[in-house]
Image (cartoon, helix red, strand yellow):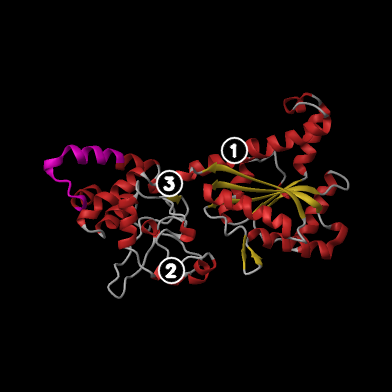
Amino acid sequence: MALGLLAEVMGWTSDTEAVPAHEYAWLRLMSSIKYDGYADFRAGVRFLESLAIWLKQFDAADRPTAYDFVKRRLVYISLSEMLRLIENFVPEVVTPILRQVVADELGCKPYEVWSTPKGAESFNKHLRQTLFVGLSDGSRIDLLRRANSGRLSPEQIVPMLNIDVGKWRDLRNKLAKEHEGATFERVFLIDDFTASGTTFIREIEGEWKGKLNTFNEMVLEAQDELKDAFPIQKGYHLHIHHYVSSDQARLALEERVKDAQERWSQAWFGEVDITEGLRLPPDLKLAAPRDAAMLDLGDRYYDHALYERIKQHCDENGQSDMKLGYANCALPIVLDHNTPNNSIPLLWAETPGANNVHPMRPLFHRRDRHG
């Protein structure tokens, strides 16, 4: 039924039977292996139904452009793909870093670290002295724990960015029982996705904001109260890791973090590394002339109510509209559990339309934490 509705919306008639047969095969395949798994499809509606409703909002002449965008430019990261990035995090990101630390410590090659009991013991100690902190529910700490059962201790993983003094004290006591007098020498701050880097760190009128500033202030407050009982050593090595990062966000993070290192007089961290499981290519962003037709649709079907909804955040970022999504990222990306507002609004925006403005209907409904 959904395929029949799509054929009607797209004008695939019996005179073009070869076209529907080819498209049906692609739609069935992509729906089953990817898009139907989107977490926020509503009851009784999956990808094909949502696609038909979404395409129908456009004028008939504009529907081929919208459909072609979904087929050729949309990037959807499924739960299974995200799980692979989570599973690869410790063996492919954390392990090489610690192996090099131990190799420098013992004066050997990284591949020789596990050739002696001393090397293996040193590696395990450095691993235990590493703290992992989830920055949001998107960090999927439950999946990280499961993927590293027996490798990481539950007492070195914190699921959210709200650690009270009692938890800090408990982390120190548990670590000290395993390694006398030890403290955490490095911290990984983990999140699922960054498109612009502004949520993680930004400066507004001389005031620093974002998750890094929140974590640093939380560390300073806890250290001031716990003193020597605080579990993280001064000048710890900070690692910032996102499972998925846009190229724009990576470059912004490098610049802003370097600036913070130079200007934060009370930064508790020392060296900083930035990593990601998947770095999206620079040309993923929609741009003319390649994406001119889709950008034109985004302009003509845009509802400025999107900007008014998060005006404060847009103004802080120097934006006067949301035609290209937050921070003008213009991304065609959807995550299995939500659609970032950095993606083009035609994918996720839902507005009623007013004052002769076209209402917007989403292909992938977004849960908006800004209201």
Q: Are marks 2 and 1 in contact (CB under 8 Å)?
A: no
Q: Residues within 10 Å of mark 3 (few under 14, many from 20)?
A: some
Label number found at residue 88: 1
Q: Who comes first in sequence, dot 2 or dot 1?
A: 1
Q: Residues within 10 Å of mark 1 (few under 14, many from 20)?
A: some
Q: CA distance from mark 2 to mark 1?
A: 37 Å
Q: Which residues are magenta?
A: 9-26
Please tell me whether mark 2 sits on a helix, a strand or a loop. helix
Q: Residue shown at 79%/56% (left/top)?
A: 170
Q: CA distance from mark 3 to mark 1?
A: 19 Å
Left or right: residue 225 versus residue 13 is right
Residue topped by disc 3? 76
Please indicate, yes or no, whether residue 159 appears anywhere in the rendered image. Answer: no
Please indicate, yes or no, whether residue 68 appears anywhere in the rendered image. Answer: yes
Q: CA distance from mark 2 to mark 3?
A: 25 Å
Depth check: give the residue in front, 355 or 338: 355
Is 272 in the magenta?
Answer: no
Residue with the most extreme front position? 289
Q: Is residue 98 above or below residue 236?
A: above
Q: Are marks 2 and 3 in contact (CB under 8 Å)?
A: no
Please identify, in this view, whether the residue under mark 2 or under mark 3 is nearer the observer: 2
Residue 135, given in percent of the width and then of the height, sits at 62, 56
Q: Residues within 10 Å of mark 2 (few under 14, many from 20)?
A: some
Q: Mark 1: which amino acid?
A: Asn
Please tell me whether mark 1 sits on a helix, a strand or a loop. helix
Residue with the most extreme left position? 15
Is 18 in the magenta?
Answer: yes
Label number found at residue 307: 2
Q: Is residue 4 above or below residue 161?
A: above
In which image quadrant can residue 178 be found? top right
Residue 31, given in percent of the width and then of the height, sits at 35, 44
Residue with the most extreme bottom position? 355
